Image (cartoon, grey):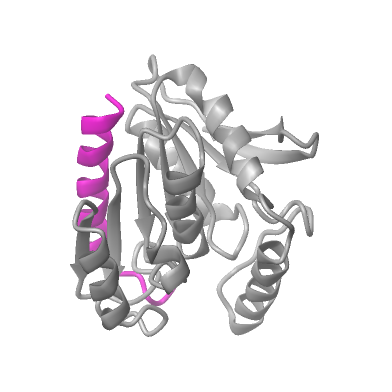
Amino acid sequence: MGQFIDLKAADGFTFPAYVAQPAAQPCGAVVVVQEIFGVNAHIRAVADGYAAAGYLAVAPSTFHRVKPGVELGYAPDDMSAGMALKATVEALPAPGVLQDIQAAIDYAARAGKVGVVGYCWGGLLTWRSACLLQGVSAAVPYYGGGITAPAEIARTPKCPVLAHFGEKDHWIPLDGVAAFQQTHPEVETHIYPANHGFNCDHRGAYDAAAAALARERTLAFFAKHLG
């Protein structure tokens, strides 16, 4: 359904993004922000799913500034490689990779209002996008790693946010989720009886019921705020 195109950030950096087109006129656009495993088969399938729901879907490669062509699986070695790449990107001078997400938002805006959805590290970047970037009409972080850190909780979103967490997620303890909820009552927050990564049907943590309910809520949220 989709193909890779090149986008250009404000600093002139060119990077690839996977773009999936809906069958009919798009009802808006969704920027899909990757996990620590690259724009791999799973993230491309997620983008295809949003296109099937009627949105122009754009998944920027948020690793390209530090390493091109990253497509990892979910084995322990892949996890280690992805975490190292994430740390390298996070260490870039500000605005770092956020300018690449901004370029994806700007491109997606040709289809109408733009939502951002991200998973794991992409969930954290989605939260930052909601707080710091322009042109975001709705944001949905899934189990955003680091989103419950004090520095992230201190941010203020500029658009409606829907947040998904797993109660069995050992990367994001529930006390951190509670602190996030307390500070941000305006954020619609849902907690599922599932592990970190519950949306990814390529990994052992996949929870079909939680993934289906979260997708249903996400699509309803985007329908409300994007059209």
Count of numbered tags: 0
Q: Nearer the viewer, residue 191 or 91?
A: 91
Q: Quadrant of the C terminus?
A: top left
Establish if 45 lies above or below 86: above
Which residue is at the front of the view, 126 or 52? 126
Question: In this picture, is 85 found above or below 30?
Answer: below
Is residue 212 on the magenta stretch?
yes
Q: Quadrant of residue 91?
A: bottom right
* Residue 173 in view of the camera: yes
Residue sitting at 69 percent across and 75 percent down? 84
Provide residue 82's location: percent of width, then percent of height. Answer: 64, 71
Vertical relation: 207 (above or below) 189: below
Residue 149 horizontal side relative to residue 83, left or right: left
Residue depicted at 69% across the width and 62% down the height: 89
| Residue at 56%, 27% in the rendered image | 106
Q: Is residue 202 visible?
A: no
Task: Residue 169 in the image: state x and y as whole percent.
Answer: 34, 80
Q: Is residue 64 left or right of residue 90?
A: right
Position of residue 212 measured from the top left corner of the image (x, y, whole percent)? 23, 55
Residue 165 sits inside the magenta stretch: no
Which portion, as a residue range, is magenta?
A: 203-227
x and y percentages locating residue 219 in the rendered image: 26, 40
What residue is shown at x 27% (from left), y 73% (from top)?
179
* Magenta span main SS: helix
Dividing the picture into quarters, in which one does residue 75 lie? bottom right
